[in-house]
RNA sequence: GUGGGCGUGGCGGAAUGGCAGACGCGCCAGACUUAGGAUCUGGUUCCUCACGGAGUGGAGGUUCAAGUCCUCUCGCCCACACCA
């Protein structure tokens, strides 16, 4: 190993210990006593006091997406976001905010359970070992987390409240009038429900958490169902195992009720457009109409959803999804065999096969005919798996002339194609799916001919509505959230099953006093042989004395991460999931008594992989809690930033198989935490994808070495090194031998010191504000490159510089700060972390003269120096007098001279 | 297919419509050294001996002025994907 640039291996542990011992980064809630001598109290005049919310400084809640503590440990992608938030947290602290910056563990998860299945070891043991390793790694990076607020979703004192929130959801319904969740007791029961059993069934069918027999994504390999979102291309997102559809009894959460609000409230939060767009796409709102087609020889009709009711005249056949309940009732005897065979074929296909074979349309005629309501045409009814049971009504009217899929299908099965839309300019109408003008759309009842598409839609929808045949409708892709898993290592549902007088089974909430409901230890963590979840093995736990039976499903991993940001606010509260005062102070800055900030988390940083699932689920839970009065904001995360992926040295995604994985532990050992942090930020913009470069780390490490040498006397460092060599065990104690360089002096600074400093202050402040860490670091480098050449280095200049460096490289900054003598203005604050952020003096940045580029016809010919006070005429004259520009002016007519004040001159010649 | 993002030196990347390439890596030269994968100084977009010219994936356009704005086009990345 090359010689160390500076003794980071001694400095970094030293400061990490100090911060921990002195609880430097503890954040105080309203009503909490600030211990005497704490730098936060000293800074804000709250030393030893117990402030109420109004006495605390403005809050700033800076949040990381908490990690799943995997057995592999941290990779360099994790600390990217963590470093960014830490820099901002330290910056805001220095600016005087009360900063909440917590960390915790999304600790439920499949790997620990799979290990338990193999070895019989309780998943908690594995989980705790992994948490310990992650904690060590994260702590070694010197992040300013308030560890007193650490949470783990697997902690019973945490999931007690996850279960409690589930009960709030279970005990609520969505009132379509008020468009919000309300306690289930307020649900009006229709008069038809005249027995307690019927009333109960009605209520249960309206709850926000309900049980349904639904076709689910069953993954045999994992032994559990998966949410739609967890299935990618017909395989499990985790592990990549095949997934099949299978009807099962499952818990669902009624997230669809919130579709409109989840969509609408995106407009009130500060997320990137691309992220909002992803959420919008996932929710998938589409406007259209429901249209009912009569069936020949059957009193029922087929209701379809269409976004193009204007093409109704072009509907030449209909398609039901193979699972549609009508199929059995309308299929003619002649077609029965073919239809059943097709249904078997469709259901037997895994999602993977369905996706892979999507190119080729398949389907079967049912033998039934429907009647096009608009022109009385008799059209055949088919079934095909390109129509999804779960979207719209599970049935479509097919308009092959103007829908790609219908067109493919019609061509394959020889069904008629009728033009009803005229494309704008001579384009082929066959398969034309965009807007145009309606044609061939006239009956004795109604005509659309000549109408542009939007107008035609309106006309036909009104007509259908007036006849009771259809209505304007809004449809969503979003489906209710499949919330149960057949696993051991998750939160058990606080639910028991009872059997009613009439023999039907129904659910009942476990009392809140029984929480947390902890999963019992098992000898064997596998599902039961008959396919029941592992918890079913614990007969004593499942069967209760009063004859009721516990729910044996558990909640998905998302549950714990849906609200952890709220628990941080009041992590050790034994009585409530979060106290009202803490919640208001940290989340709702517009509440009475607070003066600053935004509603919700001020900054939330994490990877794009959670762009839909976690963020949508968490928003949903938050809105339910908001409706029920448990939280004070409609949205949890005000500002959200996705950090970009870090690729390997080779520009490829890091993976063990490619052998390009960078282990932070190795980087830390060689370069230290400050260099690691600095490099993570120096690589490029936070949001971009960028490749790791070990040489790049060495570059910023050298920069920190230069900072060190800017301050340190080399002779004393040699003495220190010799002492360390003599007594390696006492190396840390020898740090005291290191002295400041003799030219670091407490003397007045002059303009040639102050100008670079104040330029640096301005640039770093603005860049941190905008999360442009790479350019902030570049500004620090520029300052150091200048300052290192100074003969004398005034302490009053070095001190603010260290403050600017501190958020990025806190250990080194603290160490050097400690060594600086106190200035004329008195001793520096106890900890650099709470020293007020320096401000720049614009007066010091003013130049006497300006460099003005001179262009001729837009090409740079010279740079002239003019006094700041120069008038436009002065500048013009100076430009025309330029020696270098003159040759380009000779023999030509000056047409125009553009003078951009303070910027540039452009002489336009003919 | 749909939506979003991105194309700038050998590399990572800088540039409120106003000097393209800040800062760093690498490379080249020099200094100090027994030595250097240390440190310090200087240089480093390309073509040209030079004057100068060209240059931000490509082609047009707007403008006194375009990496930046507009149109078309090519390439790469990410997400969703039979959503009626």
Image (cartoon, coloured by chain):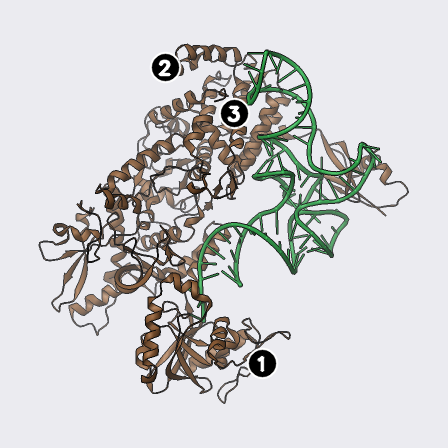
Chain colours: A brown, B green
Percent of width and height locating residue A711: 53, 18
Q: Tell me which numbered mark, 1 or 2, is placed earlier along the sequence.
A: 1
Query: Which secondary structure, mark 1?
Result: loop
Left or right: A713 in relation to A318: right
Of residues A319 and A40, the one nearer the viewer is A319
- Chain of residue at mark 1: A
Which secondary structure lies at badge 3? Answer: helix
Labels 1 and 2 share a subunit: yes
Question: Residue under circle 3?
Answer: A704
A299 or A454: nearer the viewer = A299
Front residue (pair A575, A377):
A377
Picture coordinates of residue A382 (x, y %)? Answer: 40, 78
Q: Is residue A80 visible?
A: yes
User: Dot 1 corresponds to which residue?
Assistant: A450
Q: Which residue is mark 2?
A: A729
Q: Nearer the viewer, residue A546 or A322?
A: A322
Q: Chain of mark 2?
A: A
| Quarter occupied by residue B60 | bottom right
For residue A703, side relative to residue A18 (left or right)? right
Q: Position of residue A308 (x, y in %)?
A: 49, 74
The residue shown at (56%, 30%) is: A761
User: Is residue A478 something that shows in the picture?
Assistant: no
Q: Earlier in the sequence, mark 1 or mark 3?
A: 1
Whole-angstrom CA distance, mark 1 to mark 2, is 92 Å
Query: Position of A328 compared to A6: left or right?
Result: left
Image coords of residue A154 (percent x, y): 27, 43
């Amino acid at each position: 190993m090359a010689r160390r640039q500076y003794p980071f291996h001694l400095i970094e542990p030293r400061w990490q210990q100090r911060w921990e011992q002195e609880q430097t980064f503890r954040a105080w809630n309203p009503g909490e006593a600030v211990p005497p001598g704490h730098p936060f109290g000293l800074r804000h005049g709250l030393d030893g006091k117990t402030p109420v919310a109004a006495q605390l400084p403005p809050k700033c809640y800076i949040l990381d997406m908490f990690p799943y503590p995997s057995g592999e440990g941290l990779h360099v992608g994790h600390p990217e976001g963590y470093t960014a938030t830490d820099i901002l947290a330290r910056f805001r602290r220095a600016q005087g905010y009360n900063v909440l910056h917590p960390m915790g563990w999304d600790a439920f998860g499949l790997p620990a359970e799979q290990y338990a299945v193999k070895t019989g070891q309780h998943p908690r043991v594995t989980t705790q070992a992994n948490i310990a390793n992650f904690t060590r790694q994260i702590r070694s990076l010197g992040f300013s987390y308030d560890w007193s607020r650490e949470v783990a979703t697997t902690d019973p004192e945490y999931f007690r409240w996850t279960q409690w929130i589930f009960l709030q959801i279970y005990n609520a319904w969505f009132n379509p009038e008020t468009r919000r969740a309300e306690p289930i007791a307020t649900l009006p029961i229709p008069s038809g429900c005249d027995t307690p059993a019927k009333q109960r069934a009605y209520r249960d069918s309206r709850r926000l958490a309900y049980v349904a027999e639904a076709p689910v994504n069953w993954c045999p390999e994992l032994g559990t169902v998966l949410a739609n979102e967890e299935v990618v291309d017909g395989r499990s997102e985790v592990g990549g195992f095949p997934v099949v559809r299978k009807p099962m009894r499952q818990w669902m959460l009624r997230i669809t009720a919130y579709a409109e609000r989840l969509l609408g409230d995106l407009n009130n939060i500060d997320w990137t457009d691309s992220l909002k767009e992803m959420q919008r796409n996932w929710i998938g709102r589409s406007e259209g109409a429901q249209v009912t087609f009569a069936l020949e020889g059957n009193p029922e009709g087929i209701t379809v959803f269409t976004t193009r009711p204007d093409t109704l005249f072009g509907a030449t056949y209909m398609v039901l999804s193979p699972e549609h309940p009508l199929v059995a009732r309308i299929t003619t005897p002649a077609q029965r065999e073919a239809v059943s065979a097709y249904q078997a074929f469709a259901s037997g296909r895994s999602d993977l096969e369905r996706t892979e074979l999507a190119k080729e349309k398949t389907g079967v005629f049912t033998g039934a005919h429907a009647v096009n309501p608009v022109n009385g045409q008799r059209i055949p009814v088919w079934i095909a798996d390109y129509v999804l049971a779960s979207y719209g009504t599970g049935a479509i009217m097919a308009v092959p002339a103007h829908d790609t899929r219908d067109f493919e299908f019609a061509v394959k099965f020889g069904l008629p194609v009728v033009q009803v839309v005229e494309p704008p300019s001579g384009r082929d109408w066959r398969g034309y799916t965009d807007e145009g003008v309606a044609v061939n759309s006239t009956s004795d009842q109604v005509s659309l001919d000549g109408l542009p598409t939007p107008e035609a839609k309106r006309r036909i929808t009104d007509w259908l509505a007036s006849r009771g045949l259809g209505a304007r409708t809004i449809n969503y892709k979003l489906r209710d959230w499949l919330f149960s898993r057949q696993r051991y290592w998750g939160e058990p549902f606080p639910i028991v099953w009872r059997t009613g007088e009439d023999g039907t089974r129904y659910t009942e909430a476990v009392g809140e006093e029984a929480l947390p409901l902890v999963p019992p230890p098992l000898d064997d963590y596998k599902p039961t042989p008959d396919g029941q979840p592992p918890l079913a093995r614990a007969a004593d736990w499942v069967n209760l004395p009063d004859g009721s039976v516990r729910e044996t499903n558990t909640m998905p991993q998302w549950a714990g991460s849906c609200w952890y940001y709220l628990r941080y606010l009041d992590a050790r509260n034994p009585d409530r999931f979060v106290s009202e005062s803490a919640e208001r102070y940290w989340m709702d800055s517009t509440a009475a008594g607070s003066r600053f900030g935004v509603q919700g988390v001020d900054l939330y940083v994490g990877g794009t992989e959670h762009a839909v699932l976690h963020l949508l689920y968490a928003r949903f839970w938050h809105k339910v809690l908001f409706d029920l009065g448990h939280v004070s904001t409609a949205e949890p995360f005000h500002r959200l930033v996705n950090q970009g992926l870090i690729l390997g040295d080779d520009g490829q995604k890091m993976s063990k198989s490619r052998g390009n994985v960078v282990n932070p532990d190795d980087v830390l050992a060689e370069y230290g935490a400050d260099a690691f942090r600095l490099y993570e930020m120096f690589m490029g913009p936070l949001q971009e994808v960028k490749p790791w470069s070990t040489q790049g780390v060495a570059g910023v490490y050298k920069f920190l070495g230069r900072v060190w040498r800017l301050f340190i006397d080399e002779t004393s460092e040699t003495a220190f090194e010799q002492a360390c060599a003599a007594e390696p065990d006492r190396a840390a104690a020898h740090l005291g031998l290191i002295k400041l360089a003799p030219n670091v002096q407490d003397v007045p600074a002059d303009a040639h010191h102050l100008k670079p400093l104040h330029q640096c202050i301005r640039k770093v402040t603005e860049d941190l504000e905008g999360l442009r860490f790479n350019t902030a670091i570049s500004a620090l480098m520029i300052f150091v490159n200048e300052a290192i050449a100074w003969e004398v280095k005034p302490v009053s200049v070095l001190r603010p510089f260290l403050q600017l460096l501190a958020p990025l490289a806190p250990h080194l900054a603290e160490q050097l700060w400690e060594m600086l003598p106190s200035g004329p203005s008195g001793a520096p604050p106890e900890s650099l972390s709470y020293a007020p952020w320096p401000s720049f003096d614009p007066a010091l940045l003013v130049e006497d003269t300006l460099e003005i580029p001179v262009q001729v016809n837009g090409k740079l010919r010279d740079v002239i120096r003019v006094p700041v006070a120069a008038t436009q005429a002065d500048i013009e004259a100076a430009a025309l007098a330029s020696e270098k520009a003159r040759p380009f002016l000779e023999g030509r007519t000056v047409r125009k001279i553009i003078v951009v004040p303070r910027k540039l001159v452009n002489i336009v010649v003919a």
